[in-house]
Amino acid sequence: MVDKLVNSEANARRIAMVEGCFGSSGHPLGIPGRVLVGEGVLTKMCRKKPKARQFFLFNDTLVYGNIVISKKKYNKQHIIPLEEIKLQSLEDDGPYRNGWLICTASKSFAVYAATATEKAEWIAHINKCVEDLLRKSGKKPLGEHAAVWVPDAEANVCMHCNKSQFNVLNRRHHCRKCGAVVCGPCSNKKFLLPVQSAKPLRVCLTCHDVLTKTKNNGGPNVSLNGDLSMDSSGEDDDDDDEDPENLSSSNEAKFYGEIQK
């Protein structure tokens, strides 16, 4: 069904509309062979709190952005190649339900759908697109993915030393290897994680020790210790800006291609 949409006028109009909603701040999306498979609002677990984000699934990429005006304007466009994506379903636990992890090489995060049916549809369509893309390209699935960050609210004390309490002066940091929330002294080392970045990234002391041992035993990574007072490893989540609107994931998802079984 998706292949039949490649050259259709309906597909071209949908993609042009998505481009227009992102405006000049977004990247061009209308490339030959691209199909808009589905779209909808998901609740993304950001560093500080859950936020509503608009997602667009294409047959080769996943795009999402902040909602400025519902169904009319979006910004902070993020583009994730489907070849990098691995999904992992989450059990319903606590206030958040119908969730799953979207794991990629540079960033991994949790999202939640409004209903169990929408969750199943999103997962099925994304997995089918990834499967078709890898089959056509002959590539293998990515073997290593970035850790999911533990939300700030889930850690009042450092998850490494279990002593240092966070406050205005004692900031929270995230280990780029395990995703734990740690204090400055417990994350004062960097390590090169080539899958995530060309620059050494902040890691906790435990992960640094493990990575150093791996390197000394013939691993490919190179460590770098140094002053982290000018940390350029992307400590702040640029997807954590406040929303212009207080929106929830109440907009029903739409899918334009049937999954062939």
Image (tube, rainbow, N blue to C red):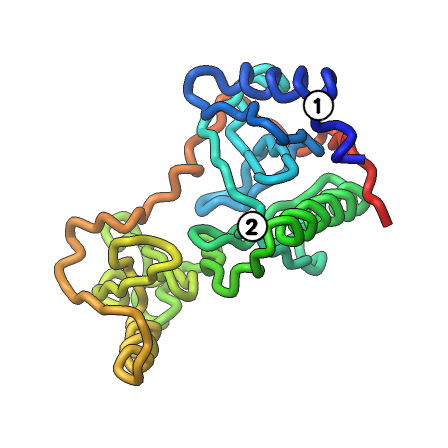
- The reply, left or right, for residue 236 in relation to residue 188 is right
Q: Nearer the viewer, residue 164 or 109?
A: 109
- The reply, left or right, for residue 148 in relation to residue 220 is right
Amino acid type of disc 1?
Answer: Asn
Residue lying at the far left in this picture: please name it: 227
Residue 153 is at least partly visible in this image? no
Mark 2 or 1: the one toward you: 1
Q: Residue at x 54, y 19 (%)?
A: 19
Q: Nearer the viewer, residue 88 or 116?
A: 88
Q: Residue at x 74, y 32 (%)?
A: 253
Residue 158 disc label: none
Residue 224, picture quadrant: bottom left
- The reply, left or right, for residue 90 in relation to residue 44 is right
Label 1 SS: loop
Residue 83 disc label: 2
Judge the density around disc 2: few (<14), some (14-19), many (≥20) Cα neighbours within 10 Å: many
Residue 250 in the image: state x and y as whole percent. Answer: 71, 30
For residue 30, above or below residue 197: above
Residue 124 in the image: state x and y as whole percent. Answer: 75, 48
Label 2 SS: helix
Q: Nearer the viewer, residue 52 or 220?
A: 220
For residue 188, above or below residue 24: below
Amino acid type of disc 2?
Answer: Glu
Task: Return the disc, 2 or 1, that comes first in the chain's sequence.
Answer: 1
Q: How far is mark 2 from mark 1, CA to CA? A: 23 Å
Residue 219 in the image: state x and y as whole percent. Answer: 33, 77
For residue 218, above or below residue 101: below
Query: Number of numbered discs present?
Result: 2
Judge the density around disc 1: few (<14), some (14-19), many (≥20) Cα neighbours within 10 Å: few
Identify the residue under disc 1.
7
Q: Nearer the viewer, residue 177 or 169?
A: 177
Q: Residue at x 73, y 39 (%)?
A: 114
